[in-house]
Image: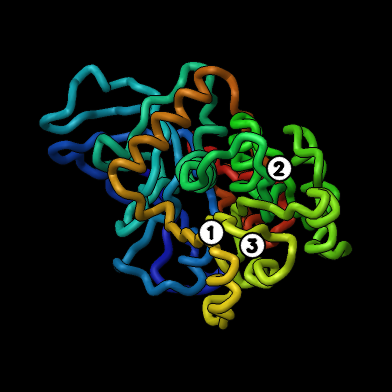
Amino acid sequence: MRAAWYTKNGSAKDTLVLGDIQRPSVGAGEVLVKIKTSGVNPSDVKNRKGRPPISPQIIPHSDGAGVIEEVGAGVDPARKGERVWLWNAQFGRAHGTACEFVSLPENQAVKMPDSLDFASAACLGIPALTAFEAVRLCHDLKDQWVLVTGAGSSVGYYACQLLLLQGAKVIGTVGNKARAQLAKDIGVNHLIHYKDEPVAERIFEITQGQGVSRVIDLDFSSTKELIATQAVAHHAQIVCYGSNEIDFSMVFRTLLFKSIELKFFLVYDLTPQARQFDVSGLNQLMSEGKIKHCVAKTFPLEEVVLAHEAVESGLCVGNVVIEVS
């Protein structure tokens, strides 16, 4: 089968190889999926650039979509031919979705709603599930002021939709006009251009002095500075799934005296119960036509280097997807 892989860390053009390798077999409890699309996420780029390979050969990408070609022992034969979207295909494994076939546990191949196309389905495993879990971890969202940092990012785009569906009043930070327009298109009325505007002052102004009571955050190293301001209300919940810096200090007294609730999570490492809730809930909303998707650009598998470089550039507004077959 055709596949893209790398054997060492480095730049996309210096490490990614395209060629033919043996098609994987399907084990007990597994399904073999013929890949239609493969999602490229920032974590895939970071892994290739700097995370030591866990195997001599790594086929990247955790997200993707396709059709079940074969089923292993213990799997309902009726699943053969099922259209599915995938999660964690390459997490803790060497074999991801940048290839024609992948074999993985059957629960990681989720039946797609009939209305969902393969390109959009490749955006779900990391971006959409991260957003769904972040919103799940917030409580009592109706009529609450919620700050979404990076509202025009892949995760933020989904998070804003989910929050609006629950009746929250959403404020989003954005880095440029294109990302601002993406957020506006799904109904986010309050946007702050964080590069040009004082974020804390704008939040205070928009909320008429209340501050936000919920924060869904992609960069805690920056957002932590807001906690000490009136932009973040007392008893606020802050749900975080990322940080541009990993080593920084905080003032405990501020957290304590404002009774701030901090929650951190990694989408790759959800509990089985949380995963099932998120997958089922997301599929239900998509079946009802309540979720929009944004594919910024597609590439053929032969242009996997360009796809990685597109993600690294940060210029794509939406998800980067590889069309495999």
Count of numbered badges drawn on the protein:
3
Label 3, label 2: how many angstroms apart (C-alpha)? Answer: 28 Å
Residue count near mark 2 (Cα–Cα under 10 Å), binned few <14, some 14–19, many ≥20: many
Of the two numbered discs 2 and 1 on the same chain, state the one appearing first in sequence. 2
Residue 184 at least partly seen: yes
In the displayed structure, 106 sits above or below 238; it is above
In front: 63, or 278?
Answer: 278
Q: Position of residue 187 (x, y in %)?
A: 75, 33
Of the two numbered discs 3 and 1 on the same chain, state the one appearing first in sequence. 1
In the displayed structure, 269 sits above or below 257; it is above
Which residue is painted at 39% across and 39% down in the image? 86
Residue count near mark 1 (Cα–Cα under 10 Å), binned few <14, some 14–19, many ≥20: many
Which residue is painted at 46% across and 66% down in the image? 47
Q: Which residue is mark 1?
A: 240
Which residue is painted at 51% across and 58% down in the image? 241
Label 3, label 1: how many angstroms apart (C-alpha)? Answer: 22 Å
Tag 3 near tag 2, CB within 8 Å: no
Of the two numbered discs 3 and 2 on the same chain, state the one appearing first in sequence. 2
| Quadrant in which residue 29 is drawn | top left
Q: Secondary structure at mark 2?
A: strand
Q: Position of residue 239 (x, y in %)?
A: 53, 55
For this orientation, the residue located farthest to the right is 196
Amino acid type for the residue under numbered disc 1: Cys
Q: Secondary structure at mark 1?
A: strand
| Quadrant in which residue 28 is drawn | top left
Q: Nearer the viewer, mark 3 or mark 1?
A: 1
State the scheme by which the image is colored.
rainbow
Which residue is painted at 43% across and 25% down in the image? 112
In front: 246, or 11?
Answer: 246
Q: Which residue is mark 3?
A: 312
Q: Which residue is mark 2?
A: 170
In front: 159, or 41?
Answer: 159
